[in-house]
Structures are given as C-alpha cells and as structure tokens.
Image (cartoon, coloured by chain):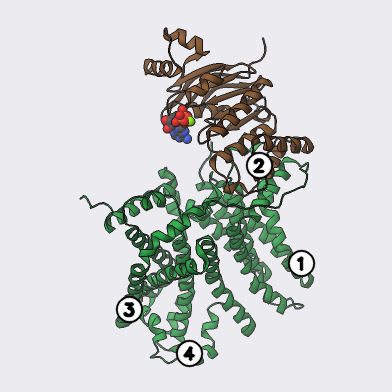
Chain colours: A brown, B green
Amino acid sequence: MTVPALAVSHLSKSFDRPVVADLDLTIRAGEFYALLGPNGAGKTTILRMVAGLLQPDAGDISIFGIDARRDPVAAKRIVAWVSDEPMVYDRLTPLEYLEFVAGLWQIDAHAAQAKANELIDWLGLRPHANELCGGFSKGMLQKVALAGALVHEPKLIILDEPLTGLDAGSARQVKDVLLGKVRDGVTVIMTTHILEVAERMAERIGVISQGRLIAEGTLAELRARIGRESSLEDIFLDLVAEAA
Amino acid sequence: MTLAPASLTWFARHELNLAWREWVAMMTGGRRARGIGLAIFIGVVVVLLHLMAYGLVAPWVARGIAPDKPTLVLLSGSGLLFWTVMLSQALESVTRVYYARSDLDLILSSPASSQRLFAVRTASVALSTIVLTGLLASPLINMLAVLDGPHWLAAYGVVIALGALSTAIAVAITMALFRLFGPRQTRLVAQIVAGIVGAGFVIGIQAAAILYYGNMSRFAIFQSADIVASAPDLGSLLWLPARAAMGDLGASVIMLALGLGALTLTIAVTASSYGHHAISAAGLNHIRSQRRPSTRAFRPASQRQVLRIKEWRLLQRDPWLLSQTLMQILYLVPPALLLWMNFGDSGGAFVVVVPVLVMAAGQLAGGLAWLAISGEDAHDLVVTAPVSPRTVLIAKIEAVLIVIAVVLSPLLLLMAVSSPRMALITAGCAALSAGSATAIQLWFRVVAKRSMFRRRQVASRAATLSEAFASIMWAGTGALLAAESWLALGPAIVALFVVGLAKLISPRRR
Ligand SMILES: Nc1ncnc2c1ncn2[C@@H]1O[C@H](COP(=O)(O)OP(=O)(O)OP(=O)(O)O)[C@@H](O)[C@H]1O
Ligand SMILES: [Mg+2]
C-alpha cells in the first residue's frame, strides 16, 4: 500500500465553539478530492490547519508520510495553498511574484524562470506579465496566485474555492490546469460550492457538516447511500439535512 | 428614541457608534487585562508629561507672566507650532474622508444624502483634530492653570477654534487640489502638503535658529530681542489667539466665532460637490502601471535574500510610503546643516545633532518595521512556504535595519571625520533606538495589509507610544553621552524600562 497524500486523524479545533470535531480524513496519492459542505461547516478551517496556517487543538496531520505538526517545513516543501482571497502583492509584477515564490521554495533559478514563463503563457497572463498586480481584476489575481502555487511543483495542491469570481473561460482554464496536474500524478484537494464542478472533476467527494465528515465516496457510492437515482445537489441536500 | 434615517443626527450616531467600537476593540484587543495595562501605561505617561510641563512653566510663572509683547510673541509662536501640527493632521484626515472606501461605496450607492454624510465626517475630523491637539497641549495648559490661575483654561477654547479653522482650511486645500490635480493625484499631493506643513515649519524655525543663534531651541527664537522688536503693537489683531488663550473673554468669543463660522461655511459651500469628488476618487483603487519588460534572469538567492529583496522592492514602489520616509529624512536637514557649519570643531553642536539622529533612526525604524513585519500582503503565502517563521522575521528585520543604516551612514561618516567618538555614540544609540522600535513592532505585530499603514498609529497606540517614548529616551542618552555626562544612564534605564513594559503589555501569542 502506498502512503496517502494526506492522512488526518482526530483533528479538532474550537474557536468560541467547536468548529472541527475529531475529524478523520484520508486522501490517496494522485487523487482529485472535492470537499463539500454548507457555509460555516468548517471546510476552510480544516484546510488551513492542513496548510499550516492554523494550529489544531488536537490531532495528527500527515502529508505523504511527513508529520506536518512535527516537521512543518518539510511538509510545506511539497504543498501548495491557494485561498479564495488571492495572496498577491499589489506592487510586484506576476513575473516578480513568481520569482519570489520560487525563491521561497528554493527552486533552481533557471528552472523556475522557464516554469514561470510557461505558466504565464498557459494561464493567458502574458500581456500583463510586466504590470503591477495592483491593477488586476479578481480573476487575474486568482490566476497569478495559482501560477505561484504551481511554480514550485508541489505534490499536493490545496485549493479553497478557487473558482469564485472567475469568468467561464478562466474557470475552464483553471479546471484544465488542475486536471492536467492530476494526470501528472499530483494530488488535488479543493472545496467548492459549485456542485457540478465536484461532480465532473472529483474522483471522490467528502461532505462536511458542522465540522464532521458525514459522507464520503465516489458519486456512485454517495448515490447508493441515499438509495435512489438523483443529482449531486439532491444527494448533498439530503445528506446535510440528515446530519442536522 | 428612533431617528429618521439618513438625517444628520442619524449619520452622526452611526459614525459615533462605529468609532466607539473600533476604539474599544483597539484598546482592549477584546481582553480586559490588556486594557488595564494600557490604562496604567497611559497614566504614567500623562504624569511624566505634566512633570515635564511643570519644568517648562514653573520658572516662567515665577518670573511673573505679564500680557506684554514678549509673552504674546512666545505664546503666538508656540501656538503656531501646535497649529501646524493640527493643520497637517486635519489635511491627512480630510483626504481620508474622500478616499477611504470601506463603507463609502455603500452609502454613495444608497439614496441617503452624501452632503449630510460629508458634514458629519468633516465635523468628526474637526473633533478628532481638536481632541488630539488638546491632549498634546493639555499638560502645558493644566500646569499654567494650576500655577498661574484658572484663566488659562480659556486656552482650550483657542484649541477648539484653531481645530475648527484648520479643518476648514484643510477642506479648502483638498478642494483646490481636486481642481488643480484631479482625483488621481490629489491624495498624494495632499499627503505631501500635510507632511510639509507639519515638518516644514518646525524645520524652518530650527534652520533659522541655527543660522542666527547657533542653537536649536524652538522656543528660544521667540524670545529673541530682534523678533520681539519687529513684532506688531499690542493692539494688533495678530495677538488675538494669544490674548484669548490668556483668558481675554472678548478675544475668546471672536476666536470661537471665527473658527466655527469658517468650518460651517466651508461645509456648506463644499458639501454639494463631495459626492461627485468621492465617486471620481472611487475608481482609483486600481493601480495600473506597466513596468519595463524585464529581460533579467531569475537570480539564485537564499530565502532570506529573497525576502529582503521583496521588502525593498515594495518599499521603493510605494510613493506614499516614500513620501513619509522622505519627510523623516527632512527632519535630518537642520542637524546636517548644523554639522556642516560646525565642521572641524567638535563643539556643543553634537549635543544637538546626536539626539536628532537617534530619534530619526527610531521613528524611521518603527514605520518601516510595521510595514515589513505586520504589513504582509501575502501572509498566507509566506506562512505556507517551507521557511521557518524565525527566518522570515530575521529577513524582515534585516531589511529594515539595512535601510536605516544606508540612510544614516553618510551623516555618520561626516561626523566620524570630525569626531570619531561622537560618530560612535550616535551609531550606538541609533542602533539601540532603531532596535527598540523594531522589537516593539515585532511584539505588537498583527496581520494587516499594507494599505492599512495609516492605521498603524491607531492599530496599537500602545506600540506607537512606547516606540516614540523609547526613541526619545535613547536620544536623551545620546545627548548626555555627547555632553560626557554620567546622567546618560538615567534615560537609558528609562528606555529599557519602556521597552520591557511594552513587551509585558504586548499581546501574548500562542
Ligand atoms: N478565526 C476564527 N475565529 C473565530 N471563529 C472562526 C474563525 N475562523 C472560522 N471561524 C468559525 O468557524 C466556523 C467554520 O468556518 P469555516 O470558514 O471553516 O467554514 P467554511 O466551511 O469554509 O464556510 P464557507 O463555505 O462559508 O467558506 C464558522 O462558524 C466561523 O464563524
Ligand atoms: Mg470557506
């Protein structure tokens, strides 16, 4: 058996009330996994803990066998995080941004430059490659952030609602880029409220409600669990209602 | 009581409510213990300021304060100093009324009257200007009232009148700038004007004092016989504010009527164009600027180098920040002048130059450290990068301290030529002062966007206060060391105490 890309066990986090409660989650290497759940279910909180942005109260996080809580730097080396709010500098150009990211991950400068240019072409940012990001639209910023996530060739990409604010064309580009990455063997975890995206792209789907994983599996498995032929939307609403 | 929506009072209550909540959140950080610590700290500072004011005022009162020309010159001159600070503060706040976006989009897109909003916001600028200057002047006024008589309390009325007047002037200047430069440039120009008004007068007086009298006391110049002799007669209207401050009822009434009248008039005249200007300023949050296509290859660099380069790039591309920094450097002009004039003889000039340089180092370090440490636009990126938080902090501190070193080193070199000992003292105290300011910013760090820089002072008053206090004390240490006095130990100990206290009340993390 191969090492899972992500193995989370007994993960808990409370703010003023419990938000994530004793969560177990395993994601296989090379898988495209979609995390669904109503607003405030705790999806962002879970992913932020995995990315090392938030200290869990309890539990273990293992990324490709690396204990992320014991050795965060080693874990971060192979992970990329993309949040729904693009984390980009207003006063750097996309190329300078990618150079900065490559430097943080200590990628060989020469290889990084080739990769950066490739990504910029791929995402259609070439006409703006030498403009400051401060003038960009939300969708363009999201693409720059995504390029930043891909420039250091991570083995696990975590995305929190990466498609919000993107036009149809850009969303398609991003989806294609992610599917291409999965084909190359990269693991992708992503949250989304667009159920159709999860239905089309994800190999497995997890449904979170009130900080718990209430259902998990392929679309067919989830259907079987509900016990009738229906759309993911119906399944999702049923599951959430059942858990509440 | 229910108020009619979108009436003047309704807006005022909304603003007051927001301001109060923000203030409470800031002061306590949601925890009472910190609020109490802060209250004690502020109490100590207030007492110290009153003691200092006592030192200034007592000898003057002992000699007897007569309403003669020298007194009026001194009062008007000091008042003018306060007033420039007010005007510069008001200009800053007024531009914010036009450019701050947070809820402006909501209100401008609602059917509520933007004129009323403008009236309320402008009035609140006047109020905050008055409160701030009032607090600044209060130790002096209170000590005068206690030692010489309660008629001095009338000076608070003058503060109110001048605050209203400077807000009116600030609005007028902002409107003129909109006409002249258009919405794109107005903010920057207004900020620069504010800085020059704030710094320029002080610098001008210092420069004049240096040139004519060879010393730098801001107040001494007002007592010089030449100036007193060339001042207008006692009956002149120029002395109105000074006489009002000394308790002349008629003068007080005229001052208040003038200030409040000017403010009301300005609001009435300019309110109608506010909505228009604010909307034209709205589209400007996007900076679109084409940089030269870079053919430069990515350079191999360590993580620390990469982080430093990023900080410097961002500093260098932020025009507002650059103007702020330049202003700090402007303050160094008089001491540089003094240094140059006394070049060769290692006389008393150093006693003045050393503390100014030390102060400047601390202030500059505080500002830059906030930007580098707290103002991280891509916080998530840096945290999820495979780099230890320690390395990130070290790189950012290095970036700040290197900038300070680059700014100060030419002056230090100039000093070293005439007196290596003084250069060494300055370098040492400047390093301590910059180090203290950086450390305080480190302890009080929060996650914030750079565009929030303006909120730096507000975000944690405790940090800003202790930072300023520590640099003043290190400046004192430098001055006394330059004068070869063992008393230097005193301010040094106080500085260490302030830094320690800052660490104590700083928010605990993890
Ligand atoms: N820093 C925080 N402090 C306090 N409470 C928080 C914090 N972050 C999140 N929460 C709370 O935790 C709960 C889960 O939030 P989270 O952002 O993880 O939900 P989500 O599933 O991502 O929701 P959405 O679909 O709206 O993005 C919410 O009730 C939120 O209020
Ligand atoms: Mg979320």
Q: Chain of mark 1?
A: B
Amino acid type, mark 3:
Ser
Residue at numbered disc 3: B252
Q: Chain of mark 3?
A: B
Instruction: Work out whether residue B47 or residue B151 is closer to the camera in this orientation and state it.
Output: B151
* Position of the C terminus of chain B by quadrant: top right
Q: Which residue is mark 2?
A: B392
Evaluate whether label 4 is on the same chain as label 2.
yes
Q: Earlier in the sequence, mark 4 or mark 3?
A: 4
Q: Which kind of residue does numbered mark 2 sit on?
A: Val
Residue lying furthest front: A169
Check the image and report above or below for B363 versus B331: above
- Label 3 neighbourhood size at 10 Å, few (<14), some (14-19), many (20+)? many
- Labels 2 and 3 within one chain: yes
How far apart marks 2 and 3 lie (CA) works out to 56 Å
User: How far separated are the C-alphas under marks 4 and 3?
Assistant: 22 Å
Q: Are marks 1 and 4 in contact (CB under 8 Å)?
A: no
